[in-house]
Image (spheres, helix red, strand yellow):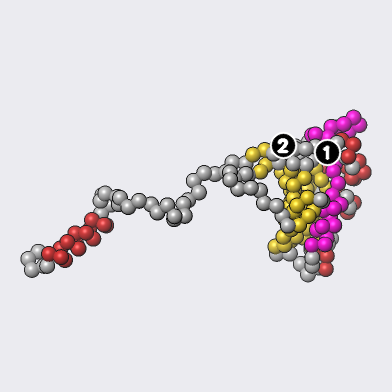
Amino acid sequence: MRGVPIAVVILLSAAVAACDPTAPPSDTPRDPAAPQPLSVAVAPVISAVTWPPPASVDRSALAALPTTAAHAARTSQVPVLVPSRRALLAAPVIVAKEHWTSFWARTESITVSLAMTRLARKVPGIPPLQGAHSVRGAPAFITANEGIWTASWLENGVSYALDVECASPEAPPCASDALLRELASELVYVGGVGAKAAGDRP
């Protein structure tokens, strides 16, 4: 490389070393202030369920449920709440799994769904957040997204999330959270495995 300045040779050598995959890694320590990737996943925990007394089961609402839905409600691992309006109890879908249960029903004007779960994720060092609203006497979060109103709260040691959607996004009942709050206040308890009592249908 006759005629090439020594400084240029040094720079070229450094550039080649930087591109060489076999070159030793840099000894520069990681900046502790830089954001670190989340390396530990927070595993869900099973919350302790507080079962309402068997006498508080709404027998009228339970009897209004179709046989399949009523059976799912009785086998639920969490206390099952359902709307008390008969139009929403005529043909609902209730799904009961190991740690959660869901309710879904539709009328000509609204679709209502309620998710109930005893699973929770608790991040060490971060206290649980409390919603600024109140639903069924408990702190709650109330949100609206694309015309769907949602209320979420804790009751019976279980997390409940109620969704209400109008058939038309512009329908007056969904112009505010009034219908959501009304339906939440009308929810009744129809049972679960912790509500076994004499006289229950098999």
Residue range corresponding to the magenta coloring:
177-202
Neighbourhood count class around disc 2 (C-alpha, 10 Å): few under 14, some 14–19, many 20 upward: few
Taking depth in this image into account, of 141 and 73 the one nearest to the observer is 141
Amino acid of disc 1: Pro
Label 1 neighbour load within 10 Å: few <14, some 14-19, many 20+: some
As drawn, 85 above or below 191: below
Identify the residue shown where x is 12% and y is 67%: 5
Tell me if label 2 and label 1 are in contact, CB under 8 Å. Answer: no
For disc 2, the marked residue is 48
Q: Residue furthest top?
A: 198
Question: Does any portion of residue 129 appear in the rendered image?
Answer: yes
Residue 28 in picture, x, y percent from top left: 32, 52
In this view, 134 is above or below 94: below
Marks 2 and 1, Cα distance to the nearest angstrom?
A: 13 Å
Residue sitting at x 54%, y 44% = 41
Task: Residue 104 in the image: state x and y as whole percent.
Answer: 78, 50
Left or right placement of residue 180 versus residue 145 in this view = right
Q: Pointer 1: what residue?
A: 52
71 falls in the magenta region: no
Q: Is residue 193 magenta?
A: yes
Screen quadrant of the N terminus = bottom left
The disc placed on residue 172 is: none
Q: Is residue 100 left or right of residue 58?
A: left
Q: Is residue 35 above or below residue 68?
A: below
The x and y percentages for residue 96 are 75, 40
Give how far across and how far down residue 27 sits, in percent.
Answer: 30, 50
Q: Is residue 76 visible?
A: no
Identify the secondary structure beneath mark 2.
loop
Label 2 amino acid? Ala
- Closer-to-camera residue (148/90): 148
